[in-house]
Image (cartoon, rainbow, N blue to C red):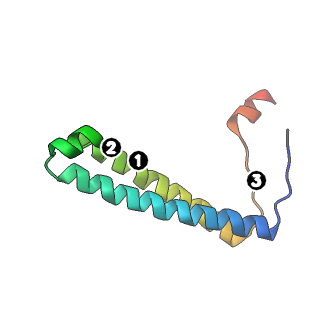
């Protein structure tokens, strides 16, 4: 099993990465919700998902925004934590 010591600098970098990702995911969510609500036009229908497909993507981006924000909060607190990978546990 691999191990890495995470420094305060690493935690700050990870928190910033997660905050930016959460913001982007929220922006994408908003755009796909607009697409879901708007009547499809020939231009948007051929290039972008609309209706239920856009709504499913918006929901996925909302979920990812929440997960990224939770990771940013974890890294910001700088409390000790362990990351376990389910595949690694299965190999033990």
> In the figure, 20 relative to 45: above or below?
below
Question: What residue lies at 83% left-to-right and 66% top-to-bottom?
Answer: 7
Element under label 2? Answer: helix
Q: Which residue is mark 2?
A: 56
- Give coordinates of residue 30: x percent, y percent: 33, 60
Find disc 1 in the rendering and name its residue.
60
Horizontal and vertical percent for residue 21? 53, 59
Residue at 55% x, 65% y is 20
Horizontal relation, residue 18 to residue 60: left or right: right
Q: Examine the rendering and report whether any part of residue 63 can be seen.
A: yes
Query: In the image, which disc is placed on residue 82?
Result: 3
- Which class describes the residues within 10 Å of circle 1: few (<14), some (14-19), or many (20+)? some
Q: Whole-percent x and y of residue 72?
A: 61, 65
Mark-to-mark CA distance, 3 and 2 = 32 Å
The residue at 44%/52% (across/down) is 63
Please identify the quadrant where the C terminus is shown. top right
Marks 2 and 1, how far apart at CA: 6 Å
Left or right of residue 63: residue 5: right
């Amino acid at each position: 099993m691999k191990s890495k010591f995470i420094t305060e600098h690493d935690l700050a970098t990870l928190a910033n990465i997660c905050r930016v990702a959460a913001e982007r995911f929220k922006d994408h969510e908003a755009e796909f919700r607009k697409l879901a609500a708007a009547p499809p036009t020939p231009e948007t229908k051929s290039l972008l998902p609309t209706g239920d497909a856009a709504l499913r993507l918006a929901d996925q981006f909302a979920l990812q925004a929440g997960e990224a924000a939770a990771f940013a909060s974890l890294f910001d607190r700088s409390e000790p934590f362990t990351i376990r990978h389910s595949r690694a546990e299965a190999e033990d």
